[in-house]
Amino acid sequence: EVQLLESGGGLVQPGGSLRLSCAVSGFTFSTYAMSWVRQAPGKGLEWVSGISGSTTYYADSVKGRFTISRDNSMNTLYLQMNSLRAEDTAVYYCARDRVFDSWGQGTLVSVSS
Amino acid sequence: QPVLTQSSSASASLGSSVKLTCTLSSGHNNYIIAWHQQLSGKAPRFLMKVEGSGRYNKGSGVPDRFSGSSFGVDRYLIISNLQSEDEADYYCETWDSNSWVFGGGTRLTVL
């Protein structure tokens, strides 16, 4: 069974940093592109960042502040978030493959003073 | 980069059928899209991918009542024999060489 489990969310002050993790199981992690998708309170889904092999991709809204990475030996996807802003407040999901055919349950990031 | 357009809301009666539309921006009529369902307070769930040919592939466990089709730049999600548990937000999604994009989502109400 494919499983994705996010962790690392929490409350952080504006300008602060946070690292999210997504631990996966049930499939060969290294062969899949992976993404982070977020959803601000009451809003729609927004793609944040993706990684395919070693190539990384970012939405303009997070470029230069967020870094996506993966550890294939640990079957884990990461999102390092720096210089956080209030508008980064959202539930962050990890999702598998280009069609997002599996999703995690999400982790909440709140940016507030 | 493609843009996806969805109606903000739709409604249909219990037991009836509904067709949700996701429209690709001009020039992107060959793009594959995916449909995702999000129940209130839950994580999204992959339903299916739909190709420009109209071929679709559903995710594991997606009921037979759900199907997909395509015409030009439009991609459709058809739900037959609507059930109360189908009341949810439905998002379409696609990608190109270096980014992914979602439509704004359609909130489906089952009357």
Image (cartoon, coloured by chain):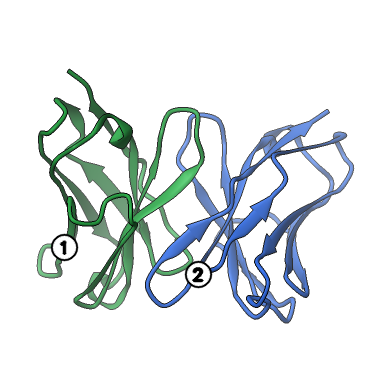
Which residue matches tag 1? A69
Tell me the green chain. Answer: A
Q: Depth check: A106 or A113 in front?
A: A113
Q: Is residue B60 left or right of residue B13?
A: left
Q: Residue, x 20% and y 40% (percent of image)?
A: A7
Q: In this rendered view, identify the residue nearer to me: A33 or B29.
A: B29
Quadrant of the rendered structure where residue B107 is? top right
How far across and how far down the image is residue A32, in percent? 32, 73
- Chain ID for label 1? A
Q: Which residue is mark 2?
A: B1
Q: What amino acid is labelled 1 in the image?
A: Ser
Where does the image place residue A25, in percent across and percent down from the top left?
26, 60
- Identify the residue at image location x=47%, y=74%: B96
Compared with A5, B42 (above or below) is above
Residue A28, image quadrant: bottom left
Residue depicted at x 12% and y 33%? A15
